[in-house]
Amino acid sequence: MSQALERRLDQPIVGRLTVIGLGLIGGSFAKGLRAAGACREVVGFDLDAGSRQLAVELGVVDRCAESLAEACRGADVIQLAVPILAMERLLTELAQLDLGEAILTDVGSAKGNVVRKATEVFGAMPARFVPGHPIAGSEQSGVIAAKGSLFRRHKVILTPVPNTAPDALDRIDALWRALGADVEHMDVEHHDEVLAATSHLPHLLAFGLVDSLARRHENLEIFRYAAGGFRDFTRIAGSDPVMWHDIFLANREAVLRILDAFRHDLDGLRAAVDEGDGHQLLGVFTRARAAREHFSKILARRAYVDVMHSNDLIFLASPGGSLSGQIRVPGDKSISHRSIMLGSLAEGVTEVEGFLEGEDALATIQAFRDMGVVIEGPHQGRVTVHGVGLHGLQPPPGPLYLGNSGTSMRLLSGLLAAQPFDTTLTGDASLSKRPMNRVAKPLRAMGAVIETASEGRPPLVIRGGQRLSGMHYEMPMASAQVKSCLLLAGLYAAGETSVTEPAPTRDHTERMLRGFGYPVAVEGRTARVESGHTLTACHIEVPADISSAAFFLVAASIAEGSELVLQHVGINPTRTGVIDILKLMGADIQLENQREVGGEPVADLRVRSARLQGIDIPEDLVPLAIDEFPVLFVAAACAEGRTILRGAEELRVKESDRIQVMADGLQTLGVKAEPTADGIIIDGGPIGGGEVWAHGDHRIAMSFSVASLRASAPIRIHDCANVATSFPNFLALAKQAGIRVSEEGNS
């Protein structure tokens, strides 16, 4: 239970609470607040005398009043918990009473009718009336079913109007939070639209479907052979008919709007079946299958009921161990992203194997599904992309949510800058802090119209219908994401677009464009494209991600007695900085079975434990290992002597400030680590145990997991949930290889 329900509050929130209507919702509200000590006195009123008596006997309220006037006298808060159509009569009666400074609130599932009636009977919407809607319930009903914990981890929506008194809103918000509810504030009309779509329409469809089938002459056979899916969907048709009759009449305008929109979509499905349009059906079915999981991720911390929610996923890494055997880490994230983007813009069907099924790459898939691309999978690393061509994307229905994926946001900015429609790119709390001016500014120079939040941070609003012009851009800082963004914008820009980088960065975009048949010229550190060509679908095999392999390269290097083979790893020369740096430190890494797959060089990497030495990391290798530095800092902590990194200021604007966060964690473990403006100085030595924080950064979490191999005591790593963004099976592979790390409580 939440803290509010485990112990009484130190101070009550209100003096006297009156609850009118002692059913399940009103009774649970009263009982929970009484138990929490949130009110000095809880008074109940119900038209049914038996309910009033039971409410007192069961400890739901302190006492019950015999009349509405008596119940409201001296109340600080009056909760209206009556059926939705009975609310109109109750409001009429309340308008005749002297309520003093009492705050009114309610629990109805439609808000527009409540606000309209209150405005009518009071002459204006009372400033001390806070409309509310708890999204909770039970198969049981009546005061006997009242449960003080009913609202814990359930959504409660408050719908204040413009003249609502702030102190009244704060008081009602505090009461619901005292019950452990997740409280949100929403506009009245928006609330009714949302509930019409998420609750009212499904009930209407369930009632209508069951009634329609029950009236067919073969009804007995229909229900006899109905499978579990039918029973699951139609379960809600067993709800209280009178209650739902009232809800549909109370919220009829919003229900009609959502019903009309659904009827339009249903007509489209009927036409697809009638015309044998399998592509249209596949698009609907693939989008629908993915949508539930996608939106669940968006709302992971905001679900109506989220019993599995944890603010802090902790890895517990036990000391010691060595690595052995053969493993294959997940597919390359950079290539996975680009395979979906270019496959979507290609003519024909692109087949992808080895796709990384992490949340970042899945966010890219969902973005293109939202823009009308039919994408099958992923299933065991296989994805089929039905391309729509360079000019075939459709306007998304709303903002494109990209989770934690900076790659998705920056590359999509280039692709979307020349589309004929507006788009908004959003992400989670971490992505929303990351700078996007590095792509917005050069895109604006090409003619794009891009709006950002303060300091160039997301969300990004990209205005459609702009004519882009090609340009030459000298990048001030090496960044493959910026380079790729501008090259992708160049596919639509008039003339030639060229990008010169100050140091080599990963060239997956250039290689993959060629693989799709689009000409790209590369001369030294300058890449050029021009518009007017097309992308042709192809087959892509994604090699294992060297960034993911890096954790095991370091792990096997620092753990005595280790010998590990990492299979089918991409060794693109713009990505092998981690291997080069480790070899300079004395690591024993051999590249075996080198070959080329789909335009990308791959090899099996054999790594044995070695005595590492501290080094000055050459600055020309920094861009080639920018994502791998967190775990390289662990290697430096295990090396003899001092390691110095310079020229890596970009690390401060990744998913976290990786320089500072790693320095803080290493210092906690007893390692001498001094952060600098553009790097770090690490003196190798013993590693202890302790508590470190990943700050939601997957690479930080995995790096400290690797550090446990040389630790003298366990390391508890907080805030590790985002490991799923790039390496969803990290814990399983780590255990298989010999690293003793697991989720705390699941060892």
Image (tube, rainbow, N blue to C red):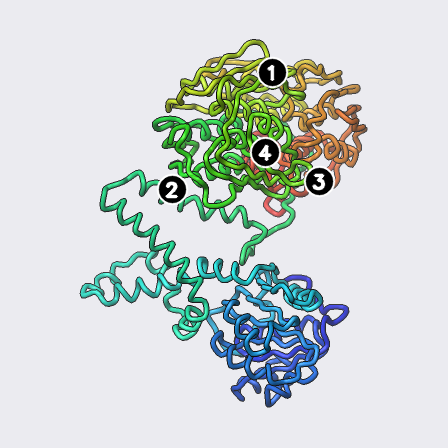
Q: Is residue 279 left or right of residue 527?
A: left
The secondary structure type at the circle numbered 2 is helix
The secondary structure type at the circle numbered 4 is helix
Badge 1 amino acid: Thr
Q: Which of the two discs, 1 and 3, labels the residue nearer the N terminus?
A: 1
**Rendered-image quadrant of the C terminus:** top right
Mark 4 neighbour class, 10 Å CA radius: few under 14, some 14 to 19, many 20 or more: many
Kindly check if marks 3 and 4 are in contact, taking CB atoms under 8 A apart as contact.
no
Give the residue at mark 2.
286
Q: Is residue 212 left or right of residue 530?
A: left
- Point 59% across, 45% down: residue: 746
The secondary structure type at the circle numbered 1 is strand
Mark 2 neighbour class, 10 Å CA radius: few under 14, some 14 to 19, many 20 or more: some
Q: Is residue 1 above or below residue 279?
A: below
Q: Position of residue 19 (x, y in %)?
A: 61, 78
- Point 63% across, 43% down: residue: 429
Q: Which numbered dot is residue 406?
A: 4
Q: Which of the two discs, 3 and 2, labels the residue nearer the N terminus?
A: 2
Q: Nearer the viewer, mark 1 or mark 3?
A: 1
Give the residue at mark 3.
693
Q: Which numbered dot is residue 500?
A: 1
Kindly check if marks 2 and 1 are in contact, taking CB atoms under 8 A apart as contact.
no
Gap between marks 3 and 2 measured at Cα: 38 Å
Q: Which numbered dot is residue 417?
A: none
Q: Position of residue 246 (x, y in %)?
A: 43, 73
Q: Which of the two discs, 3 and 4, labels the residue nearer the N terminus?
A: 4
The one nearer the camera, 56 or 376, is 376
- Point 67% across, 85% down: residue: 73
Gap between marks 4 and 2 measured at Cα: 25 Å
